[in-house]
Amino acid sequence: MTAKKGFGPKGWTPDRLGSLAGKTFVITGANAGAGFEATRIFLSRGAKVVMLNRNVDKSAAAVTSLKREFGEDADVTFVRMDLAVLDSVREAAAELLAKTSRIDALICNAAIAQVATQEITVDGHESHLGVNHFGHFLLCGLLFGRIKESNGRIVVVGSNAYKMGLKRIQFDDINFDNKYSAWDSYAQSKLAQMMFAYELQRRVEAAGQNVQVQVCHPGASRTSLIRNNANIITRLLATLLSPLAQSAEKGAWPEVMCATEQGLKSRALYGPTRRADTVGPVGECRLDEPALDREMAARLWALSEQKTSLSWPTTETGTASEIDASVSQ
């Protein structure tokens, strides 16, 4: 697919946003990096933001900082959630549903990357796949009803890594027990997230449900994502390349756009459009075929339901090939 900017030479910017008063945005991993910057943008337009974060102290500090910037009346709160622990995801979803009457957009922003050695979550999942995909898969399913009631959106923050690594889901060794690779396992997890999003789009459309699902990527942004987990060589490389990256604020623009902009395509990928889609104006990027493999996506969906003990609350439960017959292309 050919990349298109779609929003003029400067691409999409927050200047396109009007008032977001009355809107509620839920963001995972929002106490730092792109998630924090997205929160700032939403609050600056009068929205309510609920952050789903693992670290309580950092979340409290983030809320304090935001209220200092936007005033004590700024409607920003957090719910503790650890995506690596599925019971924590269930508890957070229950708490969120109890206190939030509408969700205009759920932004799946949190991620881990380049974990140096294999780590297995308490639920038995390789950490990249467990946090980046299974945790978000469960969260989206648990919140789907509230999002549907609000005619809302699900925004999946992917990565250009989806078209690197193995370019497939390694079903025969999903946890990389035979040969662990920090890069390949991360790439698999981001591919899984994107495949899930496009499969969910197909199922939602086939069921006639008014929920938008959008996919974006932040490009190369100056955040702590790699520095927190990678081995020393990868961290040094990230530091050396940092001057070539864009700010965390610009890295947040694609997810803010996907949560608010009207008229976006469904099977599309949005993000920076220059220097191999790493920086530059935000618009539509090239979408490579691995993310659109329907047979693999259907298999991943079934595995994800099994691993999370979740039966998705969509009315359409057929395979991707069965759904395809009822979805207009």
Image (spheres, rainbow, N blue to C red):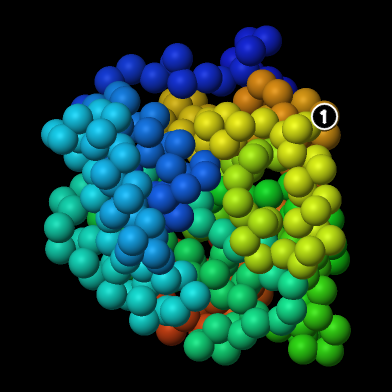
Q: In this view, does 255 lie above or below 327?
A: above
Residue 260 seen by the camera = yes
Q: Residue at x 21, y 61 (%)?
A: 97
Q: In this view, does 160 lie above or below 196?
A: above
Quarter of the image where the C terminus is located:
top right
Task: Please indicate whether residue 97 sits to the left or right of residue 241 in the image.
Answer: left
Q: Which residue lies furthest to the top in this view?
A: 9
The location of residue 237, given as percent across then percent down, is: 83, 51
Task: Please indicate whether residue 26 sits to the left or right of residue 201 in the image.
Answer: left
Q: In this view, does 256 lie above or below 104?
A: above
The residue carrying mark 1 is: 275
The number of callouts visible is 1
Give the quadrant of residue 144: bottom left
Residue 148 seen by the camera = no
Q: In the rendered structure, which amino acid carries the disc numbered 1?
A: Arg
Q: Which residue is drawn at 80% across and 80% down?
A: 180
Q: Residue at x 42, y 55 (%)?
A: 28
Task: Please indicate whether residue 131 sits to the left or right of residue 98 in the image.
Answer: right
Give the quadrant of residue 67: top left
Q: Could you say whether the residue bearing mark 1 is in a helix, strand or loop?
A: loop
The location of residue 203, given as percent across then percent down, is: 50, 58
Give the quadrant of residue 241: top right
The location of residue 307, given as percent across then percent down, is: 52, 83
Mark 1: few/some/many CA within 10 Å (<14, 14-19, 20+): few
The location of residue 160, given as percent across then percent down, is: 74, 47
Task: Please indicate whether residue 307 sits to the left or right of residue 176 in the image.
Answer: left
Q: Residue at x 25, y 29 (%)?
A: 70
Quarter of the image where the N terminus is located:
top right
